[in-house]
Amino acid sequence: MRVRFAPSPTGALHIGGARTALFNWLLARGSGGALVLRIEDTDRERSTPENVHQIVDALRWLELDWDEGPIFQSERAERHREALGRLLADGHAYRSTATAQDVKEYKRLHGAERGFRGEGRAGNQKDGAVRLRVPDEGATVVHDAIRGDTRFEHIHLDDPVIARGDGSVLYNFAVAVDDLDAGITHVVRGEDHLSNTPKQLLVLEALKAAGIAPEAALPLYAHLPLLHGPDGKKLSKRHGAASVQELRAAGYLPAAVRNYLALLGWGAGDDATILSTEQLIERFALERVSRNPARFDEAKLRWMNGVHIRELPPAMLAGEIAGYLEIERPPHAHRLDPERLQRAVEISQEKIQVLSEFWPLARLFFEPPVAIDEQTRERWLDDKGRHTLAETRTRLEHLDTFDEPAVETALLDIQGDLECKPREIYQPLRVALSGTTVSPGIFETVSLLGREETLRRIDTALEHTHFSEDT
RNA sequence: GCCGCCAUCGUCUAGGGGACUAGGACGCCGCCCUCUCACGGCGGUAACACGGGUUCGAAUCCCGUUGGCGGUACCA
């Protein structure tokens, strides 16, 4: 099995493209075949090196590797020209000066009678765009692994333009030549290409008839259902994290993204939802791909990412987080002591769904709170709160050891002695240490922060609240 | 307009003539757990687009309607 992923570098890789890449990759890895990466840059206006870089970068981040390429379509111009010459020479293609307007006019007059055949503008072999000659009779049947057979009557097809007037080839021609030359056995791509397929099949047949790879087998096709935004419309920037880069910035794990994307349009058949990449490779099958378009639901991705985060060994998660912070929050990354980071990760692991949630939750271990929100202070550092906090300070100050059990025992004791609810002890303390009402478990937090820093922050909190409370 | 694809809870889906009182997951709601936030546990809400056929029997097969989407470029 030889498959390919063939993005056109006219923008960043969005999740639809990422899923297409994933499906092809799963097929290649599951069959022991090869994945060819091909950059479809025949549109010189819109294709940029930056976009190529972005796409390659996105694939690397997703950990989807390829076996051949990247092949740049633009670098195959000579081969394309040669193939085009053959079709022109034996009459499978012809030049026509018909413009888009001419075709429009023809269709207005002839409607569904018959496709445009270069009427009135053919014959001159010197200039004009090159069109593929489509026979009036018969039909081209697309055998699709997902959809079954789809029949396209030739009578309805226009002779497609396969090369510009200057001889540079167009998408539907380049694709056919490149797929043929690369020995692609399965073309797996988005459903938006289904209507292109008969044109490509016609080109393929013309190529073979003209003596180019006459023995070659035609590839099998599989058209994946399209991916839409939450509103059912085409995916775009306003749908939040629509590109792979945005997914990375939002703190998703590549393994979780692969898991989620695989389930968009495909299901293992049983109720399996959380699947490792190994399982995906093993279980993925084109035959089980759905025909319905799917919507991208970030809420489910978040949940799934949380599950993957919790399944990761803490050391690995710490590595992911360190890498994430380095890219997304560079000013902080260098200050993080690895041991403390690992411990902070351990006690935060079950509380976060995406990597970006780590820092807001655990920054207290690396820097003191900047300020305490006014409402928070009024709620938890009132007279009563300061009283329990002062008591807490005293107890912690005199602890023999500052490990978790010791801290826990001490705090539990205060609770008993002062006869108050746990939160009446813990929340003032939490606010003093983190500046917020949310943190990892209080015993773990206090212990990890250490006695010195804990006492210092309690003092700061007490100092800063005395004055305002007394007025 | 023409050609084509698609149609099960809000979302992703299971289902391929009787196993369907339509299953699972996310979300949402409630309860439990609980030092905050989460995690976890339990329960609940919620769907076969519509109309005709075929059949003893249809979510499943056929036709039509409606709706969504794609293509119809000297874009990919």
Image (cartoon, coloured by chain):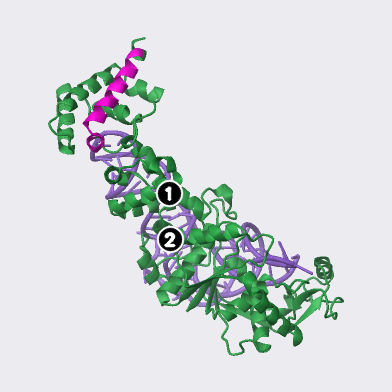
Chain colours: A green, B purple
Q: Is residue A283 magenta?
A: no
Q: Which residue reaches farthest left?
A: A400
Q: Is residue A457 magenta?
A: yes
- Label 1 neighbourhood size at 10 Å, few (<14), some (14-19), many (20+)? many
Give x and y (percent) for residue A384. Answer: 27, 18
Q: Can you identify the residue that label 2 sits on?
A: A258
In this picture, residue B66 sits left or right of residue A265: right
Placement of A361 over or under A104, stated as above or below: above
Q: Give amino acid for label 2.
A: Arg
Local crowd at mark 2 within 10 Å, few (<14), some, or many (≥20)? many
What is the x, y in percent for residue A288?
A: 45, 71
Q: CA distance from mark 1 to mark 2?
A: 14 Å
| Quarter holding residue A226 | bottom right
Q: Quadrant of residue A46?
A: bottom right
Looking at the picture, tell me which residue is in the foreground, A348 or A329. A329
Q: Residue furthest top?
A: A471
